Each structure stands twice: as C-alpha cells, then as structure tokens.
Image (tube, rainbow, N blue to C red):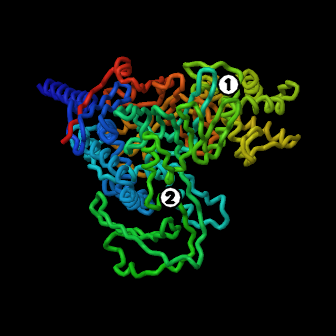
C-alpha cells in the first residue's frame, strides 16, 4: 500500500514538474492586435512586420509614419527600450536594487535626463512634433496587454514604463556617450584619480549594456562598371539584444528604408529617392584644465528611493556645459548633512571634460533632415560617414579619423585597423571583377595585413627555409607558409598569426611592421629577429596550453569565438541576484564560431584588438544599379520561443532585403502580423 502511494506521489510530482516545464517553455506573449488607436494620428496607418524581423510602415504623412515607427519599436522591443531608457535616466537602482547605484551615480552625473529635457524644449516646433508623434506610437503599444507579458518583464515582476517625449533624446545621449572615447589617464601627466575612476565606471556601464566598440564601424563606397555601391558595418559590442530595427517607411512625399536605432526615431543607415547614407557613431570628449579665473562651482542634488525602499541623496559639482572631475557624494538620506548646501568646494581648479551632450542640443534636425533632404549639421554626434547622392557622387561627412580614397574606393572609419580593410578594398577594385552577390566585399575574409606581415616573419624565423626549431614551431611555420591569409572558421594559421601579433605587442609595446600608425615597428636586425623567434616559441607554447598539443584544434572558430550577452542576466558582479534563477540558462551567453578579423572586410574579433571583443554588428549595402533594394544582415536571437537558444544558427547570417516596392516585398517575405493604427 505504501509502495503504491509512493509511486503515485512520484508520478504526480513528475507530472506537475513536467507540466510546469512544458508551460514555461511553451509560454508566449499574446499576439499583437490587428488594430490599435494612437493619439494625434492624422490618418489610418499600417504597420507590417515580417518573419525575418524587418517591417514596413504605410502612412499618409511623415508625422504618421513616425508614429507608426514608435508603435513598431515598442511592440517589437519593449524590453530593450525599457532597459536602455532606465539606464539613461539613472533609474536602475529604483527598479532592480542597490547593486546598480554605481551606474545611476554615473548617469546622473552625466545629466542625460536633465539635458535631454532641455534639448527637447530647444527643438524646433516641427522636430518636436515628430518626436511627439513617435512617443504617442510608443505609448499606444506599451499601453496594451502584450508588452507587460513579455518573458523578461514577468521574470523580473516588472512592467514597462510609459514614455515621455524626451525619452528618445536620453537614449540618443546614451548612445553618443558610449560612442565617445574618453581621454585615458595613462596618456596624461598628473591625471586626476577621478578620471581613472570615471573610466572604471564607464567600463561598468558598457559591460551592463554590452554596448561598446562603436569605433570599429566602417563605411565605404566602390564605383565600378556596375555602379556605385555604398556598404557599411555598424559594430556595437557584444549585446544579444538588437541595436537596430530595419524598416521601410512610405508616405506621399518619400519612401525611406534603412535601420533605425531602437528607442529613437533616428535612422543612421538609410536610403531615400535622393540619397543613401551611412552615419558612423562617434562623439568627441575633451579634457581641459581649470584656472583660478573660472567661476565658482555650483552643486546639484539628486534624491531617489531604491528598490529596497531606502532613500539616497547624491551631491555633485556642476559646471556649465562641462563635467567636473571633482569627487561626488552619495549617502543615505538619513546620513546626508542638512547644511551641505552651504559647503564650499576648495578645489576650484579641478580639470573638467567638455562634451556637446552637456549643452541643450540634439541631432534630431540632422537625423530628420537625412530623410527630408535638408542638411542640418550634427552637433551631438560627430556625423562621420558617407553619403551617396542621386547622381552617384560620394561625399565624406564629419571628420572621421581614417579616410582612404583611391582606385574608385572611398572608405571612412574611426579605427586605425580599418586602413588594412581599405587596402583590401583597393585590391579588389583593381584585380577582381564585381559581383552583384557581393559587390562591396562585406563577406571578404582575406587580410592584407596578414599577407604583408606573414612572409617576412617566416623569412626572419627560418631564413633560407631552414626549420631547425622545436616540432611545434616547425609545424606552425608550415601552416603559415601554406596560408592564403584568410580568417575563415577552419583556419589554423589565422590563430597562430593573431596570437603572435598580440604577444609581440605585449613584449615590445609596438605592433609588427606594416601597421597603419606611428606605433608600428619598422626595425630590422639580429636583435629584433631574435625577439620575433622567441615570441613565436611563446605563441605555440601558449596555444598548446590552451588548446592542446594537437595543432588541428587551433582553429580560428575556437580561438576567437563570438560571444553575445543578454543584459541584466549577464551583468557580472553588477547584478547577481537575478542571474540565480531558471532564466539563467535561457539568457546565458550565446557562443558562435568565430570568423573574420579586425583587418578583414567581414569584421571579426581579434586578440590584436586591445578593446573588449565586439562581435555584434549590423551590415548593409545598396547599389545605384538597384536603388530599390537595400541588403542587410545581422544576428537575431529568439531565445524566448521554445528551445530558441538551441535553434540559433551557427553559420553566417544570411542577407535580407528592404525594398522600396512594398508589393514586391510582401510577395517575397512571409508576414508575421499586420496592425492597422487609427486616430484616437
């Protein structure tokens, strides 16, 4: 009897647990509604979302198109938008707890919220009206049942916030700050300790969102017998959450297609009837010494309640249009001195940072002007990139760090490694015929950098082909001799060469010869040759310790895998509690076999790139011979569907299309849902 009861109890327990697992895996948020109502909408607007994640908005005016775009963003990316706007507003600790006070402390000092409000008030009535329409669309979607029932909100027992009109400008500021390069304290004499602390806090901010590496982005244009091809790659860190939403917006005055930043109505990659463009993210921060003639500082105070119910107060120094490197104070409200507002800071001459984001400015006019045909200047972003006009003329915009123009190729970037990719472009333009499948070379894995360095290295280590070396070194040289200088998944010499170059830099503080900046080593002599030989021995020793003695295991896909992270659940020490639940497996980092390199047109991570790996990228090209189609590719991780993370493709993402001809697009792409928006 007892045995029967035990068996029955076990079966019942297994059924309950199994049913719970099935329910957890099969749960899906409600389907998007077939119709919705948007305040301020002028005419009926249609939002079409395709199975591949791209979308189309059909409207009767530009304003209504932006309202549809806001609805689309919130319907598809409510969690991503909520995370990023709370980060920008310094509202994380009130949402998720005191562990995130370090990030709120930074973003409140950076004044994203107050300066975004001021920038919104300073917009022209026309630009403010478009922003209002976008936010009306956002709130129409967020006010529905579906967003609050997304997995991430349910797991965190949270709901999405309704938006205020200035929220997109806070995200705009956040992106501009993340794309800026701070002066590094190691490069400055007598750098203040607060600058080093700011670097560490900024590193934590990037790690929290996994958004970084924007300077690896690149744009190039190639003119050949097939026309002019504008290509671009936007690198944005290691986030598994998308940065872009691909969309075609159609209204009587224009058809615009491109990639919009999620959470903003801005399109950094796009095409209209009059132009195609690529705007690379970059913003300028500069360090300035203070003087005794500077005005006396003023102070700001922030008071808020964190998720645990405790009130905290922050006091920090504020300088007009600048960021003071004076220390701040963060205390509980109970411990905060009542007379602190009368305290005078004796350090009037602390250095300060200048950045356009501390002025009441926005690039809204420049972004909207790209679609409308005007040419308003960028002020928050640097506006670096390329524009191809309707008559095939190519224009460089902004002041990018790297510009190359020869052999029918124009390339821009803010990373010196891009010089090597540009050389490969020039080689392709002069020696290889164009192909409509890949005219801009986005899928090219060959490295001019490796092709220049490797033969010289082999000659240095083994003059006259003599291989009097340990077996591992001799085998490594054999691999290098037979290498075609491509960073494909299976390449073993790619791993050897990249590791050698990284160890060379660690040993000498310089890069090997054939490097595009002044830190390159052009020295040659017995001592230098001996250094290179010893570094090769260290290279094979290091790889043997990491991957084993069998060199067939030193494949590039394993040496430099691409890791993608889900914010909140992959936040390291910043936010531990929420990672210790059932969602930890679902939102664990996703590993994709590595391919590409910082020196190839198909970008990939590398030890030679001294920054954190940034595999996440969005790539596209459009040709003047086929203006009605923009090809793009990026990765999407649909982990919230049953067994979604196990169905992620490990191969290269395939190209998808945005088309100006909506009827053709709807014939080619399966439609996931259609929502018709009506005026409220």
Which label sits on residue 508? none
Q: Nearer the viewer, residue 268 or 373?
A: 373
- Image quadrant assignment for residue 397: top right
Residue 33 place in picture, x, y as percent: 21, 32
Circle number at residue 356: 2
Rendered residue at 68%/20% (across/down): 432
Q: Is residue 101 visible?
A: no
Q: Earlier in the sequence, mark 2 or mark 1?
A: 2
Callout 2–callout 1 Cβ contact below 8 Å: no
* Image location of residue 299, percent across then percent down: 42, 73
Q: Residue 518: image x %, image y %?
A: 75, 47
Q: CA distance from mark 2 to mark 1?
A: 39 Å
Give the quadrant of residue 440: top right
SS under mark 2: helix
| Quadrant (top left/top right/bottom left/bottom right) for the N terminus | top left
Of residues 20 and 418, which is closer to you in this image?
418
> Which quadrant is the C terminus positioned in?
top left
Q: Which residue is mark 1?
A: 428
* Residue at left offset 75%, top offset 44%: 520
Please determine whether, in this image, residue 431 is positioned above or below residue 336. Answer: above
For the residue pair 245 and 524, the one nearer the viewer reads as 245
| Residue 215 quadrant | top right
């Amino acid at each position: 009897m007892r045995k029967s009861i035990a068996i029955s109890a076990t079966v019942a327990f297994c059924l309950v647990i199994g049913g719970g697992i099935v329910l957890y895996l099969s749960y899906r948020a409600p389907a998007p509604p077939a119709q919705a109502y948007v305040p301020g909408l002028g005419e009926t607007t249609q939002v079409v979302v395709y199975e591949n994640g791209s979308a189309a908005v059909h409207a009767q005016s530009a304003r209504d198109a932006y309202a549809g775009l806001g609805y689309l963003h919130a319907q598809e990316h409510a969690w991503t938008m909520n995370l990023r706007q709370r980060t920008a507003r310094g509202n994380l600790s009130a949402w998720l707890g005191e562990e995130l006070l370090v990030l709120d402390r930074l973003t409140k000092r950076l004044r994203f919220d107050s300066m975004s409000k001021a920038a919104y008030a300073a917009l022209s009535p026309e630009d403010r009206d478009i922003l209002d329409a976008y936010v009306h669309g956002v709130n129409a979607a967020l006010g529905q049942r579906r967003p609050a029932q997304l997995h991430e909100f349910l797991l965190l027992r949270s709901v999405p916030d309704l938006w205020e009109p200035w929220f997109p400008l806070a995200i705009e500021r956040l992106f501009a700050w993340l794309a800026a390069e701070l002066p590094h304290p190691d490069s400055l004499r007598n750098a203040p300790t607060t600058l080093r602390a700011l670097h560490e806090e900024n590193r934590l901010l990037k790690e929290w969102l996994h958004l970084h590496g924007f300077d690896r982005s690149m744009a190039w244009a190639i003119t050949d017998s097939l026309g002019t091809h504008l290509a671009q790659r936007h690198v944005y860190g290691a986030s598994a959450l998308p940065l872009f939403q691909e969309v075609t917006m159609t209204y009587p005055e224009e058809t615009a297609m491109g990639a919009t930043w999620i959470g903003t109505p801005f399109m950094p990659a796009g095409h209209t009837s009059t132009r195609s463009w690529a705007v690379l993210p970059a913003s300028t921060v500069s360090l300035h010494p203070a003087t005794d003639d500077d005005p006396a500082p003023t102070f700001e105070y922030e008071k808020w309640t964190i998720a645990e119910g405790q009130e905290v107060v922050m006091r920090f120094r504020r300088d007009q249009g600048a960021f003071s490197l004076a220390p701040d104070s963060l205390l509980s409200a109970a411990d905060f001195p009542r007379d602190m507002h009368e305290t005078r800071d004796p350090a009037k001459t602390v250095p300060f940072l200048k950045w356009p984001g501390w002025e009441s400015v926005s690039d809204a006019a420049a972004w909207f002007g790209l679609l409308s045909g005007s040419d308003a200047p960028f002020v928050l972003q640097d506006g670096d990139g390329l524009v191809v006009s309707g008559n095939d003329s190519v224009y460089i915009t902004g002041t990018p760090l790297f510009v190359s123009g020869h052999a029918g190729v124009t390339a821009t970037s803010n990373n010196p490694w891009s010089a090597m990719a540009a050389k490969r472009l020039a080689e392709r333009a002069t020696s290889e015929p164009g192909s409509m499948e890949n005219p801009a070379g986005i899928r090219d894995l060959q490295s001019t950098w490796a092709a220049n360095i490797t033969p010289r290295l082999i000659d240095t280590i083994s003059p006259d082909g003599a291989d009097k070396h340990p077996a591992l070194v001799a085998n490594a040289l054999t691999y290098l001799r037979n290498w075609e200088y491509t960073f494909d998944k299976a390449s073993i010499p790619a791993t050897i060469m990249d590791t050698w170059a990284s160890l060379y830099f660690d040993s000498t503080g310089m890069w090997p010869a054939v490097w595009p900046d002044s830190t390159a080593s052009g020295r040659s002599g017995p001592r230098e040759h001996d250094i290179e030989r010893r570094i090769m021995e260290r290279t094979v020793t290091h790889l043997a310790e990491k991957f084993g003695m069998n060199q067939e295991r030193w494949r590039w896909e394993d040496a430099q895998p691409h890791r993608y992270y889900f914010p909140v659940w992959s936040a390291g020490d910043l936010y531990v509690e929420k990672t210790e639940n059932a969602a930890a497996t679902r939102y664990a980092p996703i590993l994709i076999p590595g391919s590409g390199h910082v020196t190839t047109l198909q970008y990939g991570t590398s030890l030679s790139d001294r920054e954190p790996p940034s595999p996440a990228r969005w790539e596209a090209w459009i040709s003047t011979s086929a203006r009605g189609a923009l090809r793009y590719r990026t990765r999407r991780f649909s982990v919230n569907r049953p067994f979604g993370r196990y169905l992620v493709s490990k191969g290269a993402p395939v190209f998808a299309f945005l088309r100006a001809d909506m009827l053709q697009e709807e014939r080619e792409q399966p439609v996931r849902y259609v929502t018709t928006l009506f005026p409220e």
